[in-house]
Image (cartoon, coloured by chain):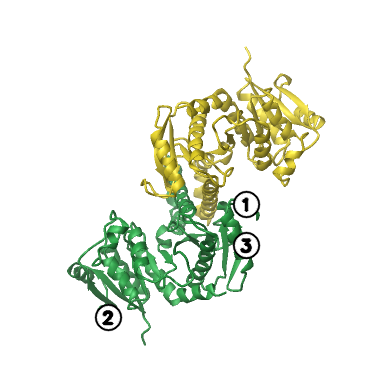
Chain colours: A green, B yellow
Amino acid sequence: MTNKVVIAVDAMGGENAPTKILLGISEYLKVNKNVFFKIFGPQKLLENEVAKYDIGKDFIEIIHCEEIIKDNDTPLSSAKKKNTSMWQAINDVKEKRSNVIVSAGNTGALFVISKLNINMIENISKPALAALWPNKISMNVVLDLGANVECDEKNFEDFALMGAALHTSLYPSHQSKVALLNIGSEEIKGHETIKKAYQILENKKNQLYDFCGYIEGNNIMNGDVNVIVTDGFTGNIALKTAEGTANFISLELKKALTNGIIAKISSLANSFNLKKFKKRFDPRLYNGAIFLGLESPVIKSHGSTDHIGFTNSLDVCVKTVNGELINKIKKNIIL
Amino acid sequence: MTNKVVIAVDAMGGENAPTKILLGISEYLKVNKNVFFKIFGPQKLLENEVAKYDIGKDFIEIIHCEEIIKDNDTPLSSAKKKNTSMWQAINDVKEKRSNVIVSAGNTGALFVISKLNINMIENISKPALAALWPNKISMNVVLDLGANVECDEKNFEDFALMGAALHTSLYPSHQSKVALLNIGSEEIKGHETIKKAYQILENKKNQLYDFCGYIEGNNIMNGDVNVIVTDGFTGNIALKTAEGTANFISLELKKALTNGIIAKISSLANSFNLKKFKKRFDPRLYNGAIFLGLESPVIKSHGSTDHIGFTNSLDVCVKTVNGELINKIKKNIIL
């Protein structure tokens, strides 16, 4: 049989590329062999890297591309270079030779080149950037996280149905529960756009996903809902504020727990539990943002993540394909 | 001498009022006697409460008001009841009999009644709700936190100069460093309003406060700036998201540290350091939101805080008066 998931991989994006990319692929192949990697980048460099790791030749194909997009290239200048590993990987999905594309490179470039090449899903007006965010029970899908600074009610409606489809693809055993991020839970709260979106979603209630009204920032992680819809400006600030808060608390906690000899000893005794705690908050577990709204899934791995983080974004790639993300979005559109 | 700070206190707002209010006053009088409280609420009830605590009669006056604003009253219905403890306390500031008003009651009502009664500072177009938010070095002033869902560039400019004045009043030894909350640090990032505000503030650079450009959500707590300006929608969501993240981490940490007998023992050994950690994050320390833009300071204590939190909001009252907040705002306007 085949029906392997074919992943187009930009091997040259992000810190420590291509090493972390190929190491991540070799790790992923240990747990799932029903996958084939088309790896885009300079042939010789990639062949040398592949030789270092346990990657069977049946699982990969290297496609030579001379050029590379750098982190400080603008999206527009990047979009002009067609022989880059990123452009060629995206083009492979456009040409239906791969099912999904993943890159740890320049986010703006990935977004612009994907939009240029891959068709939008009919009736979706703007693509959105979604990411995973832990909650008490499992995981939230949160969108938009910066692709659209200003949004209208139709965009919010699209984000809701795309986010619900993504959540169901990634976590098939959970019903998607959608909420709009707002500054209060009463119907009268917020700006006009969000109130109109509320009415649209309230009137479109259906069996494929639940609409749960508004959610406030302090309840994002309480597990009552799992798809959180907002504009790209607010979403970006909320996500980064949560990251900053978590970092701040971790640093203060570290100071508190290592202050003095008794603290050091007891922290040591406690290290096993703290390890579990750290693991629960390991950002590599949540790695993999998803561009939604195009006819193929486009996955963004964090630029600064390591090979373990990249492996997790490969898991997101496979789940969006096997979970039939694009079909699920289309089903939600015609509701 | 006198020049005591005269504080108009709505004794009937928030959970456990008036007990926590009067207990908070008695605690505050232990550390600062250069203050006089005008306490608004039902005379007999308050007299009975006062008798329970160590509150010298020279420091208080009870002003009888029959009615009370409830948490679920709308701002508009609240604004019609003129014999409430909140309305009368605000009116006392309006009539210049008190220097500052504090309430732990209904936020919307406090905002609307204050706006109805107290004149706006000339040239300020909208009042804003500011609060304190810890950073690595000291404290941030963040505004707006929900008073204005939509803002223009003039509002942002006003928020910047009012926030700078507030920070200098509360922390006179720190230079105010203002930044606009945005989704990137480059000039081209964000929506049109924030870009226009950036230009205005960049062109108004002065010696009373620094303008430091944009700040992203993940850097709010890093201490590089201390006055963070945003619209009420974004600010409210950022603040509540930070609260939710901190709560989530605390709960997970508690689970991790008390899982098993070894963990329990070592946590016990560690309790002193954890207590310091908890104290650093005690929300009661940051209690006291400030309505800025009116001719008198209006302080909002959190409804669910206890007497210690209320005591801290009394400290904010005194600092805004002694720090000449309103004069500082006016000085910043004419820059």
The residue positioned farthest toward the left in the image shown:
A44
The residue positioned farthest toward the bottom in the image shown:
A1
Camera-near label (2 vs 3) is 3
**Do marks 1 and 2 share a chain?**
yes
State the residue in front, B243 or A320.
Answer: A320
Which amino acid lies under the numbered mark 1 shown in the image of this protein? Answer: Lys
Q: Secondary structure at mark 2?
A: helix
**Mark 1 / mark 2, whichever is N-terminal:** 2
Determine which of the numbered discs, if any, sits on residue A189 in the image. 1
In this view, B16 is above or below B251: above
- C-alpha separation, residue under disc 1 versus residue under disc 3: 13 Å
**Mark 2 / mark 3, whichever is N-terminal:** 2
Coordinates of residue A167 in the picture (x, y in percent) = 50, 68
State the residue in front, A18 or A109.
Answer: A109
Camera-near label (1 vs 3) is 3
Coordinates of residue A158 in the picture (x, y in percent) = 51, 66
Which amino acid lies under the numbered mark 2 shown in the image of this protein? Answer: Asp
State the residue in front, B144 or B50.
Answer: B144
